[in-house]
Image (tube, rainbow, N blue to C red):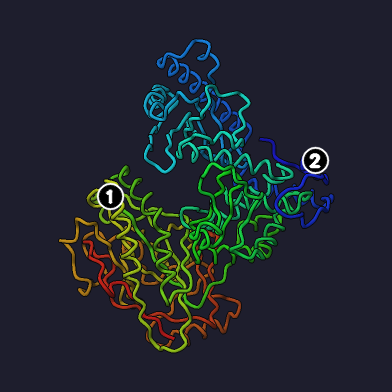
């Protein structure tokens, strides 16, 4: 795909057409210097794979052409089996539409394609999930074919010539599908079932966004930049309570409406300017909502009480209008707002687009979740369910009276195995927890057991009710300190500091955590079938080499001298005052912050030494080999001033 250059970027022209629900903030035309900066922005983005090569783009077009041909052939076959007249069969039509990042023109290398199969009224959804699925199975280019018929939006997933494609289905109340069909036409929604309306929604929203921006090329380059920034700053994930692709697209589109003649380099700056000052929960709207009198539920806090509690509403422009950010929580909004405010400081037309520093509160801790299952197939289903519910855990933690913020990292990591002999697949997530600064208590015990237990109960209940649960599907949770993340996460994610000794680093699988100085908290949440084999949490488990392979998290952290990134100071040891030791170290290096690096060197969570709270953890065993029931005080933090 041809990249926008200084000569290709449109300067924009003042136009009488009005975009958005308010007047523009500025109609200033771009200057030559803005074009130069936009060209530099394009060059800065290239190393990050946000542009696809022309050859790969042509391959996608070729694959979509093949898929469209299959669709038309299949519709003719179905029409014949339903005894339609020959004249109707020849003109019945049927078409594949794309939506999402590919339709917006901002997809990256290797990204999947979201597609919608639009069929005439005589083609049933059952046909799509039966005979069309069979036709796909016959294609040599099709791999990894699977149907998810019971999903909220039913979908067929496949790999076509190594390109991942998700296909939705919509049956319109039309005898034939015209070649020039415009899915933005609200009349198409009449007499459709709700699953078809949901399937159409992706295309309708995408097309409306493109229709509502003054200059599509400027919009695309700006959106590529903001999406990369959001991913590198770990705030790109709808399922975990941040923003997904369509939400970022709408924020960028609103910026374009407010500065209709600006080019991408200016729009990136204006994006942060606008949304660092946005007064949430005022909604972001690209157009005035319209009522089509089809009695479909739309986002309207005047009518629907639950809509009044949405924290960061970004409303889709196509009927029926919905809030695309209903998963956003107090913590995730706080994290994103802080990132918006940091944005103007971090942005320059260089590789620094991918870096940020975010301040946190007085005490940062981490909860590591580990989801494991016996086989790869079971693991895929199990991880999908666990991930979809993590925002419940974040919500539980937010309600804890001692917690200021809970920040889940959207990036997951492969988890270590519980045993080398066991065929087990696991995935880890890291949640940063900031506790409120203590003013009145020397020592305070913070019990997180109930918060985590409520989350795991929800996951297990849904797994059982949906008949997905299998024996040995487990969720395990542990509390770790900042310095231990270096041993839990891959070395490429968190660069490790060189050891003072010449001894080489031991591999994660060959180590166990030494608890002689620091006792961390953990709990292994049992599967419903494992409770009978439970061990009391009060039974201490000694640290050090245990003979058998170590437990999952213990296997990931063991060095007596904890490894740290170049940004992180050595651990504060006992005996002696942790605060005194830390102040001594900082006295010689006043510019250093107590900090930890979060995955991909994208987010540095810094803790000012003047506000540091030392931590003393209760002596609880570290992930025993057998699951244990979660009981009161099984995961507890003792914080002292």
Against 199, is 511 above or below?
A: below
Q: Residue at x 49, y 23 (%)?
A: 71
- In percent of width and height, residue 442 lies at 40, 89
Q: Work out whether residue 85 or residue 96 is closer to the camera in this orientation and state it.
A: 85
- Spatial CA span between label 1 and label 2: 59 Å
Q: Image quadrant for the C terminus?
A: bottom left
User: Which residue is outermost to the left?
Assistant: 532
Q: Earlier in the sequence, mark 1 or mark 2?
A: 2
Q: Work out whether residue 498 or residue 587 is closer to the camera in this orientation and state it.
A: 587
- Kind of element beneath mark 2: loop
Closer to viewer: mark 1 or mark 2: 1
Q: Circle 2 is placed at which residue position?
A: 7
Task: Identify the image quadrant of residue 96.
Answer: top right
Q: Residue at x 40, y 54 (%)?
A: 387
Q: Image quadrant for the N terminus?
A: top right
| 80 left or right, relative to 586 | left
| 536 left or right, relative to 215 | left
- In percent of width and height, residue 513 lies at 32, 68
Q: Circle 1 is placed at which residue position?
A: 465
Against 403, is 597 above or below?
A: above
Against 54, is 423 above or below?
A: below
Q: Work out whether residue 98 or residue 511 is closer to the camera in this orientation and state it.
A: 98
């Amino acid at each position: 795909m041809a990249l926008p250059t200084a000569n290709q970027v449109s300067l924009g022209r003042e136009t009488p057409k009005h975009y958005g629900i308010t007047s523009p903030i500025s109609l200033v035309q771009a200057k030559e210097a803005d074009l130069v900066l936009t060209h530099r922005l394009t060059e800065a983005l290239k190393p990050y794979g946000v542009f696809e090569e022309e050859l790969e783009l042509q391959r996608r077009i070729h694959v979509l052409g093949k898929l469209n041909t299959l669709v038309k052939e299949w519709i003719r076959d179905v029409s014949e089996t339903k005894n339609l007249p020959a004249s109707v069969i020849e003109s019945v039509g049927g078409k594949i539409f794309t939506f999402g990042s590919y339709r917006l023109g901002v997809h990256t290398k290797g990204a999947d394609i979201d597609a919608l199969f639009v069929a005439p009224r005589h083609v049933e959804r059952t046909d799509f999930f039966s005979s069309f699925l069979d036709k796909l199975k016959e294609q040599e280019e099709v791999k990894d074919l699977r149907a998810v018929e019971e999903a909220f939006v039913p979908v067929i997933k496949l790999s076509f010539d190594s390109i991942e494609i998700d296909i939705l289905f919509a049956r319109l109340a039309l005898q034939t599908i015209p070649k020039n069909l415009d899915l933005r036409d609200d009349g198409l929604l009449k007499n459709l079932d709700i699953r078809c309306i949901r399937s159409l929604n992706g295309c309708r929203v995408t097309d409306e966004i493109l229709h509502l921006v003054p200059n599509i090329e400027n919009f695309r380059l700006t959106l590529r930049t903001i999406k990369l920034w959001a991913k590198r700053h770990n705030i790109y994930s709808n399922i975990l309570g941040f923003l997904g692709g369509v939400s970022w697209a709408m924020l960028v589109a609103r910026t374009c409406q407010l500065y209709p003649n600006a080019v991408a380099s200016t729009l990136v700056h204006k994006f942060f300017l606008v949304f660092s000052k946005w007064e949430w929960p005022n909604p972001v709207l690209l157009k005035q909502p319209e009522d089509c009198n089809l009695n479909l539920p739309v986002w309207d806090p005047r009518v629907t009480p639950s809509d009044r509690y949405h924290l960061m509403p970004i409303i889709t422009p196509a009927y029926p209008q919905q809030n695309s950010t209903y998963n956003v929580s107090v913590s995730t909004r706080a994290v994103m707002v802080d990132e918006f405010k940091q944005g103007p400081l971090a942005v320059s037309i260089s590789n620094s687009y991918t870096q940020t520093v975010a301040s946190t509160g007085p005490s940062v801790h981490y909860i590591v979740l580990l989801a494991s299952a016996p086989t790869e197939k079971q693991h895929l289903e199990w991880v999908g369910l666990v991930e979809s519910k993590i925002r419940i855990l974040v919500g539980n933690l937010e309600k804890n009276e001692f917690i200021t913020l809970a920040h889940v990292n959207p990036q997951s990591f492969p988890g270590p195995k519980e045993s080398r002999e066991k065929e087990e697949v696991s995935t880890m997530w890291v949640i940063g927890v900031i506790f409120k600064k203590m003013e009145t208590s020397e020592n305070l015990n913070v019990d997180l057991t109930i918060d985590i237990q409520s989350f795991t109960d929800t996951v297990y209940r849904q797994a059982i009710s949906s008949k997905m649960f299998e024996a040995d599907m487990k969720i395990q949770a542990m509390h770790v300190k900042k310095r231990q993340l270096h041993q839990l996460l891959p070395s490429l994610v968190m660069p490790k500091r060189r050891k003072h000794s010449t001894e080489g680093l031991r591999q994660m699988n060959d180590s166990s955590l030494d608890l002689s100085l620091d006792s961390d908290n953990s709990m292994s949440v049992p599967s419903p079938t494992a409770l009978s084999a439970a061990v009391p949490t009060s039974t201490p488990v000694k640290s050090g080499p245990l003979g058998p392979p170590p437990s999952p998290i213990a296997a990931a952290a063991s060095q007596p001298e904890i490894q740290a990134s170049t940004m992180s100071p050595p651990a504060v040891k006992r005996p002696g005052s942790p605060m005194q030791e830390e102040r001594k170290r900082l006295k010689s290096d006043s510019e250093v912050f107590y900090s930890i690096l979060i995955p991909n060197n994208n987010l540095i969570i810094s803790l000012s030494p003047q506000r540091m709270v030392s931590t003393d953890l209760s002596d609880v065993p570290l992930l025993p080999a057998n699951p244990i029931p979660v009981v009161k005080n099984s995961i507890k933090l003792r914080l002292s001033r």
